[in-house]
Image: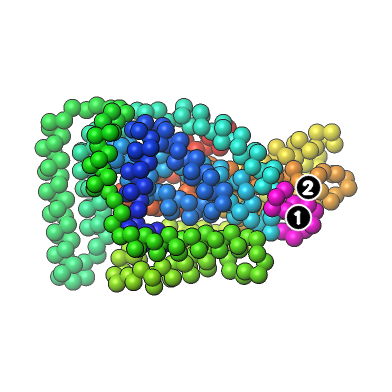
Amino acid sequence: MVLVAIFSETGFFDYCAVKAYRFSRGKVWAMITLLCLIAAILSAFLDNVTTMLLFTPVTIRLCEVLNLDPRHVLIAEVIFTNIGGAATAVGDPPNVIIVSKQELRKRGLDFAAFTGHMFLGICLVVLVSFPFLRLLYWNKKLYNKEPSEIVELKHEIYVWRLTAQRINPASREETAVKCLLMQKVLTLEMLLRKKLRTFHRQISQEDKNWETNIQELQKKHRITDKILLIKCLTVLGCVILMFFLNSFVPGIYLDLGWIAMLGALWLLVLADIHDFEMILNRVEWATLLFFAALFVLMEALAHLHLIDYIGEQTALLIKVVPEDQRLAVAIILVLWVSALASSVIDNIPFTATMIPVLLNLSKDPDVNLPMKPLIFSLAMGACLGGNGTLIGASANVVCAGIAEQHGYGFSFMEFFRYNFKLLTLN
């Protein structure tokens, strides 16, 4: 989050938004398809959270340019981020846990074997997801029904009011600042009421004047600090390189969190940030607190043996199936149980618990099941299950937090209403 906060000071995200707008030639679904494909490809090699940290500000700015509702586009990106993360052994934490298991490696499930099988299945999921997503999101749901001028004014009022609400006056100066902010809100609301009297409601269509607007956008949104941009790209490139080396080089004993932390500290030194408090204000502390509480809850469930119970009951159901149908039932059962469980609980402890259960099933002479299909089913279900609910994957929560900070938050039910249908299809 610190890396992205400093990165945003360069104007790089606005610049990318204008370039994507120009490349799509004003066609909304060409832009959405492009963003989703890039998100899926990056997530196959980067952590999902990192991908959404980089993509969310770009998407929001681009949607503001096109007068779109960013929430639907962000949800679509999160879907393909979670799908793309399942394609490789380093794309999602459950996959990393599986490939890091020494016993699985000894039985032939290495990086190449895992990625080779998962990649083909994920390609099929992507091909099926695009047309279904097009059916879910019609243009009338994507476009704002009001002109961009009114939409931007409403959003500006929301941001000013949110800023004022976050100030807890402890001194006379802070009270004066809060009063000035609320006075600004009242002024903007008066301006909004005047504009609402004169405008005629209409649904926006494809931008026919994109060629005439692109020149103005390029003048307004450009790289503001090229030196800082070079520093940010250098640090980010080193962090990504360390992510790869951490997966392949056994001599590196840093986990992904420490690598990102060291990168943030390095960039703070290089960027010579004087107003460090401004950077800290951009960190999603509410999101971090949510993750901390979620991990405490998962540890409590582990001590209650709830996750162990789910794994044991799954194994018992597989054993009672006739032998000629056992493999097919086992694959389907592991896939659906892992997907549904990962929708409501964190998929990392669930994957770690299910691996020994599946290994014992493959070793049991009474069951006589091959190991690899069961492991692939577990990985597929655990990764795709993150699309089921807002708390199903870390990338979902991070994206929602950043969107809320920009004034475009979406609720749990709004996420669930669209994504669970797609999860079922996948």
Q: Quadrant of the N terminus?
A: bottom left
Which structural element holds mark 2? helix
Q: CA distance from mark 2 to mark 1?
A: 9 Å
Residue type of the residue flagged with mark 2 = Met
Pointer 2: residues within 10 angstroms few (<14), some, or many (20+)?
A: some
Q: Which residues are magenta?
A: 101-113
Can residue 422 be seen here? The reply is yes
User: Which residue is depicted at the point 85% across and 49% down?
Assistant: 364
Residue type of the residue flagged with mark 1 = Leu
Residue identified by numbered label 2: 371
Closer to the camera in the image, 280 or 393 = 280
User: Which residue is depicted at the point 70% across and 37% down?
Assistant: 332
| Quarter of image, res 121 | top right
**Residue 61's x, y, as percent?**
32, 46
Determine if the magenta segment contains residue 105: yes
User: Which residue is depicted at the point 21% across and 66% down?
Assistant: 169
Judge left or right: residue 212 versus residue 398. Answer: left
**Residue 170's x, y, as percent?**
21, 70
Closer to the camera in the image, 56 or 338 = 56
Instruction: Examine the rendered structure and indicate whether residue 324 appears above or below residue 411.
Output: above
Q: Which labelled disc corresponds to residue 104?
A: 1
